[in-house]
Image: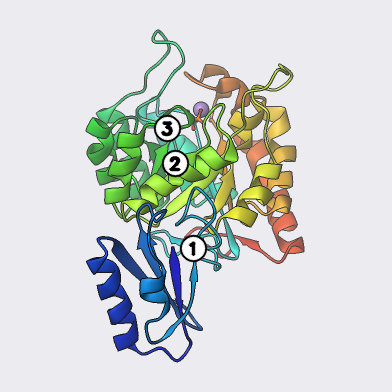
Amino acid sequence: MLIVMKPDATPADVARVVRVIGTMGYEARPMPGRQRTTVGLVGNDGRVDSSQVAGLPGVAEVIHVSKPYKQVSREWQAEPTRVALPDGSTVGGREIVVMAGPCSVESEEQILLAARQVKAAGATVLRAGAYKPRSSPYSFQGMGAKGLQLLAQARAETGLLLVTEAMDTQGLETVAEVADIIQIGARSMQNYPLLKECGRLRKPILLKRGLSATIVELLLSAEYILSEGNPNVILCERGIRSFDTATRNLFDLAAIAVVHGLSHLPIIADPSHGTGHRDMVPAMARAAVAAGADGLLIEVHPNPERALSDGAQSMYPEDFVRMMREVVAIADVIGRSVATPVGSTV
Ligand code: PEP
Ligand code: MN
């Protein structure tokens, strides 16, 4: 339930609404807006008697949020959420943030070289997994803590931000100590204990769409994080299962437009996992930006033939340079720009 205050409602009016909601046994979240304040009632409001608040001074209207997800909905917040990153950039505003790097951290040499290459091409965030959720237990599982240490080294050298995956609640804190953005992978999208723990942090969370998840399920998973108090959620379309084997997954471009209609949260696109083939990545990256994606997650490897995971979809660094130029041009056409590395003049 959302209580919309009148534009001239006083702080005392808002405080009274918060108090009354508290006495009803619910948590109230006041959200000051440019024109007026709204107060959200958090929790299952199915049986709440709204007449108790509807008549209070300063209350303009009471809205029952019709969607199963509440706080992530456009009804709850009309303005797009801008997730602030430590370098001063934001995801969800005018800028498009490009996160790029190998699927996994494999060695000091590999990650440092990859970091320099993606930075030179214009990315501002380095991606790479230290803990890898692999379909087979016999595949490379990631370097673990050593991988995180190497990522921190790459950040220290290049100034790039880091996005890396946390797979479980036990490992979340360790990842959170190093990551600037914590990735929750497709296979973990419905790991509700993990989502709740992410909600107790304040760091940005990159929530990837599950392999067979509907858009509503993605939004409900985001709701878990917001409902625990962390509003810094970035959604990610990374393709879903389909009957067609021409691509690794079916990259759901329309999900970007759907999410922007239903939610105020930013959504970025991962055409690497979305297609599974490096040759298809630039076309889908351009399309995603044209469709309104707030960022891109792209796998780039200094030597894709030798990659320990996802080599076939990892771009050659020189191709990534070209793709970045195209993406910058598309962004310009739709009145946006690609976030540039700190201190860069490009
Ligand atoms: C990844 O980003 O390397 C990854 C494992 O992605 P997903 O969870 O989307 O499969
Ligand atoms: Mn990968």
Q: Residue at x 41, y 72 (%)?
A: 51
Q: Is residue 106 visible?
A: yes
Q: Secondary structure at mark 1?
A: loop
Label 1: few (<14), some (14–19) or many (≥20) C-alpha neighbours in 10 Å: many
Mark 1 close to ligand 1, CB under 8 Å: no
Q: CA distance from mark 3 to mark 1?
A: 24 Å
- Residue nearest the viewer, comparing 123 with 96: 96
x then y, percent, for residue 11:
32, 87
Instruction: Tell me the element at label 3.
Output: loop
Lower position in the chain sequence, tag 3 or tag 1? 1
- Residue at disc 2, secondary structure: helix
Return the residue at label 2.
221
Residue sitting nearer the eye, 52 or 212: 52
- When the figure is inspected, residue 194 is found, relative to residue 222, above or below; the finding is above
163 versus 33 height, above or below = above
Quarter-of-image position of residue 184? top left
Q: Residues within 10 Å of mark 3 (few under 14, many from 20)?
A: many
Q: Looking at numbered disc 1 in the image, what kind of residue is underneath it?
A: Arg
* Closest to the observer, 20 or 100: 20
Name the colour scheme: rainbow
Q: How would you rate the neighbour count of disc 2 (Cα within 10 Å): few for under 14, some for 14-19, many for 20 or more?
A: many
- Residue identifier under label 1: 82
Left or right of 259? Residue 229 is: left
Q: Mark 2–mark 3 contact, CB under 8 Å?
A: yes
* Rendered residue at 49%/52% (across/down): 124
Q: Is residue 335 above or below residue 188?
A: below
